[in-house]
């Protein structure tokens, strides 16, 4: 019951916030919400179940392309998002079947291969998926009239998806399935001796995580009104893993911090390159590498100062304030 109350309170607060923020900040808030769907799902897989995935950017691409194709065919956003989640869930089940048989670097290698192969499929089937240029699609205007800010409408869609994802995953983590995830993460042999089906539990975690990634990718496509392979590169998959580690591995609240960092750090690097005078060639080289470097430095600093991530640090500070 407490979780539902927090969801309603958060929805009301965020709804009011969208009226206060200008259009660009509403777009950034929507982007945070889209990434939150993916980081929350990856938190369940890696933080709760102990499986490492380096291919969640590819799963987001699967959801995004499905939404784009469905929008072109039917023009119904709820149907498109549902199809994106369903398609990615099926893909996650297939990957999960292979992942349940692998451990450590072998599992990371398989998911890494998925992150590399899936964006290349768009180039291979360019007649359907648009190749390197990607796909664009039409999104109906808000039902509140043409004067209603479109970015606010996008923020509402993204926030609704993120709140629903957090509510469902929070309930899942608190259920017997969440306890099974943690048992498998802590000791697979002990979990198996206690009667848990380890492989089935790991596949379920991968399916749930893939569904979150598909929804996040679909919402990102709705925000950009387009989808292309470059938006879901291997770098995005690495960013997602670093985001949940920096935010706080194993905590859905940490997934929120990670999603915020995914939007805030690239914006920070863009501001740095604007302030610091750089040659055009150097600025172009730093454009793609600087965000990854800053994210890596942030990861190192957080792991040294707060091994539990930002959320772990917040938990340690809160009792001190109480005392």
Image: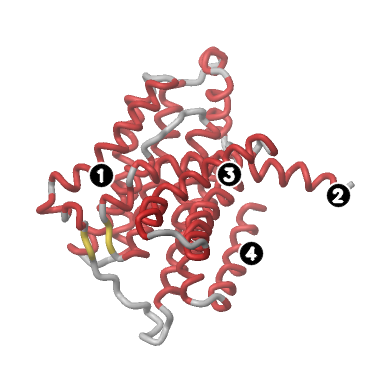
Mark 1 or 4, nearer chain start: 4
Q: Which residue is mark 3?
A: 298
The location of residue 182, given as percent across then percent down, is: 57, 28
Q: Residues within 10 Å of mark 3 (few under 14, many from 20)?
A: some
Q: Secondary structure at mark 2?
A: helix
> CB of mark 3 within 8 Å of CB of mark 4?
no
- For marks 1 and 2, give the one nearer the viewer: 1
- For marks 3 and 1, give the one nearer the viewer: 3
In front here: 66 or 257? Answer: 257
Question: For the residues marked 1 and 2, what is the alpha-carbon distance in whole angstroms?
Answer: 49 Å
Instruction: Determine whether, in the image, residue 104 is placed left or right of residue 94.
Output: right
- For marks 2 and 4, give the one nearer the viewer: 2
Q: Which mark is residue 226?
A: none
Q: Which residue is mark 2?
A: 322
Q: Which residue is mark 4?
A: 9
Residue at 45% across, 34% down: 205
Mark 3 or 1, nearer chain start: 1
Mark 1 or 2, nearer chain start: 1
Mark 3 or 2, nearer chain start: 3
Instruction: Determine whether, in the image, residue 257 is placed left or right of residue 93.
Output: right
């Amino acid at each position: 019951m407490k979780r539902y109350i927090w969801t309603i309170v958060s929805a009301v607060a965020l709804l009011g916030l969208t009226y206060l923020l200008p259009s660009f900040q509403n777009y950034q808030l929507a982007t945070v919400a889209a990434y939150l769907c993916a980081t929350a799902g990856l938190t369940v897989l890696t933080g709760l179940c102990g499986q490492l995935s380096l291919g969640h950017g590819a799963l987001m691409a699967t959801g995004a392309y499905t939404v784009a194709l469905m929008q072109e065919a039917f023009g119904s956003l709820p149907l498109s998002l549902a199809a994106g989640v369903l398609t990615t869930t099926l893909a996650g089940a297939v990957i999960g079947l292979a992942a349940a048989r692998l451990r450590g670097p072998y599992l990371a290698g398989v998911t890494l291969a998925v992150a590399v192969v899936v964006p290349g499929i768009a180039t291979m089937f360019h007649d359907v998926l648009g190749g390197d240029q990607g796909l664009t699609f039409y999104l109906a205007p808000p039902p509140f009239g043409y004067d209603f800010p479109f970015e606010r409408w996008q923020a509402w869609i993204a926030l609704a998806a993120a709140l629903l994802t957090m509510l469902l995953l929070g309930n899942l983590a608190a259920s017997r399935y969440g306890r099974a995830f943690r048992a498998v993460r802590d000791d697979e042999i002990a979990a198996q001796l206690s009667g848990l089906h380890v492989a089935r539990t790991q596949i379920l975690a991968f399916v749930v995580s893939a569904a979150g990634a598909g929804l996040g990718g679909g919402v990102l496509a709705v925000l950009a009104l387009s989808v292309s392979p470059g938006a879901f590169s291997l770098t995005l998959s690495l960013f997602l893993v670093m985001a949940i580690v920096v935010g706080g591995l194993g905590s859905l609240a940490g997934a929120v911090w990670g999603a915020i960092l995914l939007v805030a750090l690239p914006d920070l690097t863009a501001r740095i390159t604007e302030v610091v005078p750089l040659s055009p060639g150097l600025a172009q080289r730093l454009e793609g590498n600087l965000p990854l470097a800053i994210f890596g430095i942030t990861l190192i600093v957080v792991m040294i100062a707060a091994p539990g991530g930002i959320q772990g640090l917040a938990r340690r500070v809160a009792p001190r304030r109480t005392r």
